[in-house]
Amino acid sequence: MSATPQKNRASRRVLAAAAGLVTVGALVAAMPAGAHDRGHGHGGGHGHGHKPRTVDVQLLSFNDLHGNLEPPAGSAGNVSKTHPDGTVESIPAGGVEYLATSLRTARKGNPYSVTAAGGDMVGASPLLSGLFHDEPTIEALNKLDLDVTAVGNHEFDEGATELARLQNGGCHPVEGCYEKGKKFKGADFPYLAANVTKEKTGKPLLKPYTVWKKKGVKIGFIGVTLEGTPDIVTANGVKGLKFHDEVETINKYARELDRKGVKSIVALIHEGGAPASTSYNYDCDSPGAGDGISGPIVDIAKGITPKVDALVTGHTHQAYVCTVPDPSGKPRMVTSASSFGKLYTDTTLTYDRRTNDIVRTSVKSANHVVTRDQPKAPDMTRLIDRWNKLAAPIANKPQGWISADINGRGSTAPEKPLGNVIADAQLEGLAPADKGGAEVAFMNPGGIRADLVHKASGSEGDGVVTYGEAFTVQPFTNMMNVVDLTGAQLVTALQQQVSGPNEASPKILQVSRGLTYTLDLTKSGADRVVADTIKLNGEAIDPARTYRVAMNEFLAGGGDGFPALGQGTNKLVGASDLDLFNAYLAAHSTATAPLAPPATDRITVIQ
């Protein structure tokens, strides 16, 4: 999902248990040896005798893991299920120990099984993975027998060179190797980036596609990220890269695969849609094919050549199994498995050995919950324990206390309690004249990656906020900026929340104490922000006056569709967002006087 994907900086001064430093060289596009011609072969073969004309290939898929190796805490770790009587059940789900068990169980009895992912495997990760530049997650995905993934926008958080290191291996260029005597091996599955090219050469950054083969069965996978990746990633993350149209790119490589005799094709697309219900078992083909889903993936799906047999999608963190008509009007499967490893999709692709193509009318698909009442995969438990030991000295340090859950990611309201805490922390830390003289602070909602959960995650005790928990909320370690903006620019920025690229899917900024306004959702476009209600400390915003505004460097660069915020002048670079957040927790809470969830009364919403 769109977020503040930044370089992971100061807080990464860790436990580099390495002796020497290994520098990642120029971007290497090579895939791991043999990755283009693999089939893990989960299960046995058909034995001897005449081969049947068709064979069922099992496609297991998931998306937007974001380094969540441990079960996500609080509301972020639940999936909704609607029962026939209309009641909605909330089911705790996710955690790579359970995801591994789910996938391994699903593969049993399926000799032709391939596992694919829709991007954002890493980035915006909890501390257990993020502290180590997501090496633990790549190691876990290798153990999961992932065959292929598309890149997502978060794969570019730390730039193309770091993405190359995740693919090809080698120890971190600054922090070295984390475990003595162990060198990071990289991903043994290919990352596909068909629509990402290098500006200088025009050549693809990574492989555009791969072909999975097993006993004469061949399936091509084309991987793309959303064309709008540069709008939601810092400039440094996408420096020197060009992002192309998803449909044109997929159609181009589908023709190439077709010419090579690969007739069965799956597109892995890091872009998604919004089903009409958040329940994972919602039927989004009711009343007709694809009627229950909206968003960018619908137009993309309608434009992709009929040569492509199924679409695995992501980015929006939603759960859906829909059929959207292809350009010839025939239904085609489009799936997404929520996020954080809480679901996986099981799709049956019936492969015709005579035509080498998928029998589209027989494609079946369903999402399944990665429940936490099944056995944990012991190898994943060992992996988590190993990395937790390395992270513990930093992760377990208390930062503050809370009296109840303070919801951020888990809140669906425009104004989120945790958003208010974060914006207030930024304003307080940057208000002193020598720190920037900030009068107001803005926080982008996508940068809030979790809730603050009252229940203890380890042995720290209920209500204690550890460094690891604070990091999970704000994992990007963005540097803060304070800039001059006119009142007119401030008003325009607030209107950009609900207009331009954000009109269809508003991005409501979290605002610091003192800024108030009315959001009228019965109106359309920029008018939804009622301009004459915008006040700072009770006074109307003066269009001609200059204000000192605090925000992270991603917003200050105009990210997330806020070009007005990118017009700031007299920039002062402050501490990181995480440091300000932790300082605020320390200053405003004690064990006997914990921080309570703040009121959400800054934005008046008219529905």
Image: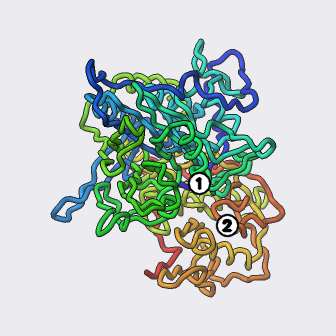
Q: Which mark is residue 562?
A: 2
Q: Quadrant of residue 28?
A: top right
Query: What residue is pinned by disc 1?
Result: 246
Query: In the depicted view, which residue is nearer to us: 305 or 83?
Result: 305
Few, some or many C-alpha atoms within 10 Å of disc 2 (few <14, some 14-19, many ≥20)? many
Front in this rendered view, residue 54 or 208: 54
The outermost residue toward the left is 85
Query: Residue 90: x and y, percent?
Result: 27, 54
Counting from the top left corner in percent of width and height, residue 45 is at 30, 22
* Neighbours of disc 1 within 10 Å: few (<14), some (14-19), many (20+): many
Rounded to the nearest angstrom, the CA distance separating label 2 from label 1 is: 23 Å
Indicate how the structure is coloured in the image.
rainbow
64 is higher (above) or lower (below) than 322:
above
Task: Please state which amino acid type lies under the numbered disc 2.
Answer: Phe
In the image: residue 443, left or right of residue 266: right
Residue drawn at x 75%, y 64% is 566
Question: Can you name the residue that lies furthest to the right here?
Answer: 570
- Asked whether, in this view, residue 174 is left or right of residue 220, the answer is right
Q: Disc 2, disc 1: CB below 8 Å?
A: no
Kindly identify the amino acid type of the residue bearing the numbered disc 1: Glu
Asked if residue 418 shows in the view, the reply is no
Lower position in the chain sequence, tag 2 or tag 1: 1
Q: Which mark is residue 264?
A: none
Q: Position of residue 569 (x, y in %)?
A: 82, 65
